[in-house]
Image (cartoon, helix red, strand yellow):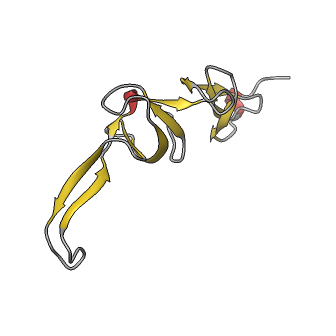
Amino acid sequence: MYFRIDDEVEVIAGADKGVRGKILRVDRRKNKVVVEGVGRVWKHVRRSQKNPQGGRLNKEMPISASNVMLVDPSSGKPTRIGVRFLADGSKERFSKRSGAGLGKIAPARAAHATKS
């Protein structure tokens, strides 16, 4: 899973299908993401020192990472994410739709550098 915090994604399945939002949290162990404004539920909280009023809180719940697609920064449409090695041997994410780079995810390694 190559999602990062602050990526803009679009929900492609479920009750919130078609909604776009920013990723707030990524849970790589459970393969889930929390997207801003998606998967909202009511949580009933008891009165406490932290929450003296008590009542109902509206919060976002995690959804499966397979139910979201990254929004391509150049075209604004949903796209898959690929990984490729650059000439210096560093690894970067890229958009499969347009081929645009989305930022490095690993430092340069001599083993993956192209020989010139």
The percent position of residue 22, horizontal first and vertical second, equals 50, 45
> In the figure, is residue 79 to the left or right of 110?
left
Which residue sits at x=30%, y=31%? 15
Furthest-right residue in this view: 116
- Which quarter of the picture shows residue 31? top left
Rendered position, 106 above or below 115: below
> In the figure, is residue 57 to the left or right of 75?
left
Which residue sits at x=43%, y=47%? 36
Depth check: give the residue in front, 43 or 107.
43
> In the figure, is residue 47 to the left or right of 22?
left
Quadrant that contains the C terminus: top right
Furthest-left residue in this view: 46
> In the figure, is residue 85 to the left or right of 79?
right
- Which quarter of the picture shows residue 114? top right
Rendered position, 48 above or below 81: below
Depth check: give the residue in front, 56 or 61.
56
Quadrant that contains the N terminus: top left
The percent position of residue 26, horizontal first and vertical second, equals 42, 44
Q: How many labels does the image show?
A: 0
The percent position of residue 72, horizontal first and vertical second, equals 61, 29
Rendered position, 65 above or below 50: above
Which residue sits at x=47%, y=32%? 10
